[in-house]
Amino acid sequence: MSDAAEPTALSQSAPVWRLILSEPSDAAGNMAVDEAIFRARAEGLVPPTLRLYRWHPPAVSLGRFQALDERINLDAVARRGYGIVRRPTGGRAILHSDELTYSVVVRETDLAGGETLMGSYRTISRGIEAGLAYLGVRVSLGAERDTGPACEKALPTICFAKAARCDLVAAGRKVVGSAQTRSRGVILQHGSIPLTIDLDDLLAVLPGPSDQPLEERRRKVSLAAVGVAELVGRPVSFDELAGAIRLGFARRPGVRLCEGPLLPQEERWAAELVAAKYANAEWTYRAPPRS
Amino acid sequence: MYPEELRYHEGHAWVREDGEELTIGVTMYAADEMGEIIFAELPEEGTEIERDEAYGSIESAKAVEDLIAPVAGTVVRRNEAVLDAPETINEDPYTDGWLIVVRADEDAGLDSLLTAEEYRAHVGAPEAEEEAEEEEEEQEEDIEEDEDLSYDEDE
């Protein structure tokens, strides 16, 4: 079995990764820290890093090239005091509310199969998958064309309305939505793992196409996505899920996680990136390239 | 898969020399890796690009990937048709799917580009399509393997 062949966290030869457990941050801060770590890994300043974080206040994140149109209700975002940010990664809009967000920053050579896109998704997903298994939740990588009712292209603006082959699903419902960016052999993959999904809140902020009745959109999203608490059958806290994900990464990619802080250099880069990019309207509200 | 008349860069770019102008695109390997490309962001005319630095990016359903410049130069034109129909990069990466044309700097770095054979060795796959198929199979096997795993002993 491949499981036996992989190093485990108990093995002395297991690679050491840094674990960052971030305090809740606003949207721009969260994206800036992910990119600062990406830059630091590219410069060889830090080891491979797993970061677990959450958002305060809740926020909508947009895909790198996603258009801001009527399917994202900016008034509802503002009324709720939620943040909005454009990610460095692709994909669709996500409402980050009651969730755990992870980011993994590695060189391609840090990961088994890291030189290919699906290989890297698969290896990172194994850690998440093994973590969720500690909570009794079984998930697997989704398929673009076969995820049951979840995969209707019904609400194309919302990430959690559609599972891709890079997402983790349970019985066809998306549990973890992930996105990746790569540059010069360095990978940033981050993803959202909702603890609970508030459909009213989600559809107020990300209403999707207006030509469909609200009830229909509610039905589609509830068929397409599910929070961890519903799958476990009881409330699950951020800390409990974070603990499970830590155990998962120790088991499946087989890494030793050593908790550590951001480097001062990463802090500086993050502050610069907040000002110049992630809190900057020019980046957030920029027009997408043509398509 | 990798036309002999082109030169290649480790960042999965190809270069076609045409007098002083160099046409640049991404290789079939990169296009297949990315899956269907849905957005392309390309520099405007007059932009100076640096060898080994990002000059644009492409997005597929899987990832956003920087486009790494294989040479240094100044953008003379970009492929507007690809901006409107990025999937052309998947369909025809070496002709209709070209990305930019640059006028090379004196020290553009042309000499250090790879031949088709060297690039083929670099990506380690004679046929990217075959690799993609193998990958799909591996993925299915992985999922099946995981079905057999029990985590109970760790709890």
Image: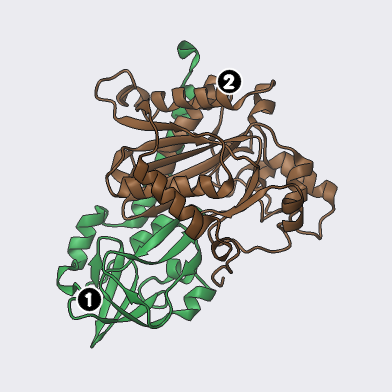
Chain colours: A brown, B green
Residue B124 seen anywhere in this rendered image of the structure: yes
Q: B106 or B77: which is nearer to us?
A: B106
Residue on which the image places disc 1: B5
Residue on which the image places disc 2: A136
Q: B123 or B127: which is nearer to us?
A: B123
**Quarter containing the N terminus of chain A:** top left
Q: Residue furthest bottom?
A: B19
Calculate the distance from the C-alpha at mark 2 to the C-alpha at mark 1.
56 Å
**Quarter containing the C terminus of chain A:** bottom right
Q: Residue at x 58, y 69 (%)?
A: A287
Q: Are the residues under badges 2 and 1 in a single subunit?
A: no
What x and y, as percent, mark residue B99?
Answer: 39, 75
Q: B130 or A234: which is nearer to us?
A: A234
Say above or below: B9 vs A238.
Answer: below
Callout 2: residue from which chain? A
Would you say A245 lies left or right of A18 here? right
Callout 1: residue from which chain? B
Secondary structure of the residue carrying tag 1 is: loop
